[in-house]
Amino acid sequence: MRRFYVGLGLSMILGCSSDPEPPAGPDPKRVFEERSRVQKHLDAPFQMETVTRFRTTDRLPDLDVRALLFAAGRIHVGTPSGLYREVETGEAFEAVAGVEGSVVDLALGPPGEILVAMPGGVARLLADGTVSTHTTSTGAGLVAVASAADHVFAATSSAVFELESGGFGPVQELGGLAVRDLAGSPTELFVATLSGVVAFAPGTRQARRIQAPDEILDDDVRALALDEATLLVASASGLSVRTNPPRLWRAEKGGLPNADLLAVSARNGAILSGHAIGANAIDPSGKLDHYHTQRWIMDERVQAVALSDQGDRWVGTAKGLTKISLQPTTLAAKAEHYETLLDRHWRMDGFLDEEVSYPDPYALEATPRTDDNDNDGLWTEMQIAPWCFAYAITHDERYYQKARRAMDVMMMEFDVPALTFEASGKKRGFITRSLVRDDEGAVFSGKATQSNWHLQTFEGREYYWKDDTSSDEYAGHFFGIPVFYDLCAKTDEERAEIASRVRSAMDYIIENGYDLLDLDGARTTHGVWSKLAIAVDTVDGCPEKHSLVECVFSWGGGGWLNSLEILGHLLAAWHITQDQKYYDEYDRLFSTERYGEMIPIKESTATVMDPAFENHSDHELAMLSYYTLMRYEPNPERREIVIDSVRKLLETELGERNPWHIATVATAFAGEIPVEDAVRTLQELSLDSRLWGYDNGHRKDAKKIVADRHGSAQFDRVFPYDELRTMKWNSNPYSANDGGAGTEVLYGTPWLIAYWMLRYSGAIE
């Protein structure tokens, strides 16, 4: 392993094989990073799920899908208005002539035939394209059809019928059954009933029962499927696969996410089941995928499922049909996908709007609506950094140009409020939450009546800037700006313009006693970096000298986070300006004010250690500051304190498989890290970034624990990331539900920041 100590004045060389001689005293130019690792992931193709939706009648004339069958190389769809077949291009469906009326079931018939069950009879689609229809006079509508031993069978909900030369006649041996479904093998007919499964041999006319608890999970059987000779039984409590020994999939931890099965299909060892909520796919290796919400399917209740020879997963609902395909891709290709979509998120020539909105979630070709956000600076800085990591690795100019474009507006977040402050006789140094410009229509004009927005002319344009900036914003700026300074800035002029803003901002904080004072002279709501270590030893006795709120804040996690932040800000200012006073202030806070003792995570750090108070937003902000501290801390002992702390945070959240947090540790720690967990998450994260409403409350494959800090339900484990709502890293991945209507789209930064930091650290090649 090589640990790099890089001097910016020495042409940014990052490949020296041994450490240079340390200068006398701390050198502000040096950076400390890990770039070469034995433990790494080589990017290679993996299977990624893609979704094709048939949600409009121009593609599928009837969206109420009741039955699905893959036959003759194409998917067939049964609906109340008839039978439809996939056209050769796969882009739409066409009606099958000769099948009139509602279709309730589909099955493979004798070789070359497709059987179509309708309430009044069965249509047989022959290999030559002709259709023969056989009516029934059962007095009740058919519910199922199947072929067994070259015989054709159909069933109502109370009887089974066999097609003979004279038409359909009742199967006396199968009388008195409450029938749900049929399935046929070369030797037997299987009947799903309310009291188990009945197996009937047409040759011998013998029937036998397959029942719970010895042979299947329960007797409330809803659907059947055959994979060669293996019978699959879908019932109320789970899935029974009739192998030897049988495989029983219950709704439980390590099993199915949910029960209440309604449909099942199997092919070549793969299984697809439809449920009252969603669908589950099990591949031959046992890997399970759970599909629900409009990210995957058109309605929660799944009425029909089918698997194709190619492995496509077809899921039919009352509101449409989806095809879920497995396509090979790479992490590099996903990065390019997210990068391309970022163009939707530009606002005001430089902000990255982390969520843009559309009137219709299925019309993303329209121009999205952008808006201001309280954390515009934070979200933008978090994208500037991955662009600069990418630029440092690839030397692709487009990454620099995008980062430069965004940085120009970040500088305005310093400059625009500075004019207002100076006009009021105050010093510059305040960074605004956000800006809006006079060409943004209602986004701009709507601020005229809001007292927390301030009008300011700047370089010939009118702007409103927002006050009450929080420490969150500063955490973003003191992460993204130093990364840009080190890895993107090309000229001394660029570095000088950055240094002047950083100096003014840091001086403003120091001169106001580490409180962020607003235009009115009062401290902003969350702009506090003072008195952070007042409960460093214990909370007992603290309220005798300080307010209870301050004591609890210091003791329970606020002191940990804000100490990381302000110490990181000071080191970044020292590095960028090369002014010793910032290191001296850092040293004073670290030692004299005991902020350094707040860095280790303790049992009392409730925002990390207690699931009821765990604050993932704080974890995200902490990672920004951890990175800065580890990058610029010149004292090896202190740097180890920081590294131990970030590793402790990572240890507490290993089950989250957070790739950005793993990447942050990788940039500074040469030891073993869970790289493959990070890669798994990057592979899992969906290409669909719409904020669909996600309610996993129905899942039984995890245990619900104490409610989270918002009082919302949460689980004891994190599901695969493509089975969670779309989210940033400030969200709780254990949460049971969240999201929206799909009209808002999240930018790709959460994925990109993790990917490019892992690339930069050498953890991914």
Image (spheres, rainbow, N blue to C red):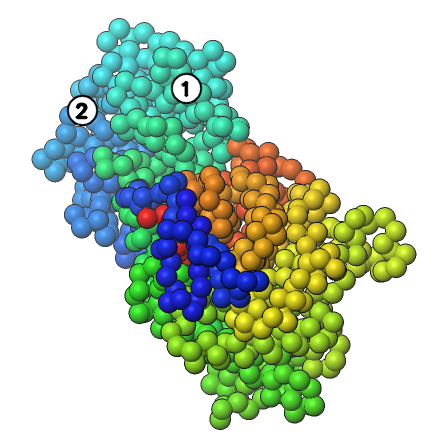
- Please say whether residue 63 is visible from this viewpoint: no
Residue at 65 percent of width and 89 percent of height: 422
Q: Is residue 19 left or right of residue 453?
A: left
Q: Is residue 208 left or right of residue 657?
A: left
Residue at 47 percent of width and 30 percent of height: 256
Residue furthest out toward the right:
544
**Label number found at residue 110:** 2
The amino acid at mark 2 is Pro
Position in image of residue 255 (x %, y %): 48, 28
Depth order, front residue of 602/31: 31
Position in image of residue 528 (x %, y %): 71, 66
The amino acid at mark 1 is Arg
Report the quarter where the N terminus lies: top left
Depth order, front residue of 364/234: 364
Depth order, front residue of 617/521: 521
Residue furthest out toward the left:
128
Callout 2: 10 Å neighbours few (<14), some, many (20+)?
Answer: some
> Which residue corresponds to mark 1?
247
Q: Nearer the viewer, mark 1 or mark 2?
A: 1
Q: Does the CB distance between marks 1 and 2 fall below 8 Å?
A: no
**Quick one: SS at disc 2?**
loop
**Quick one: SS at disc 1?**
strand
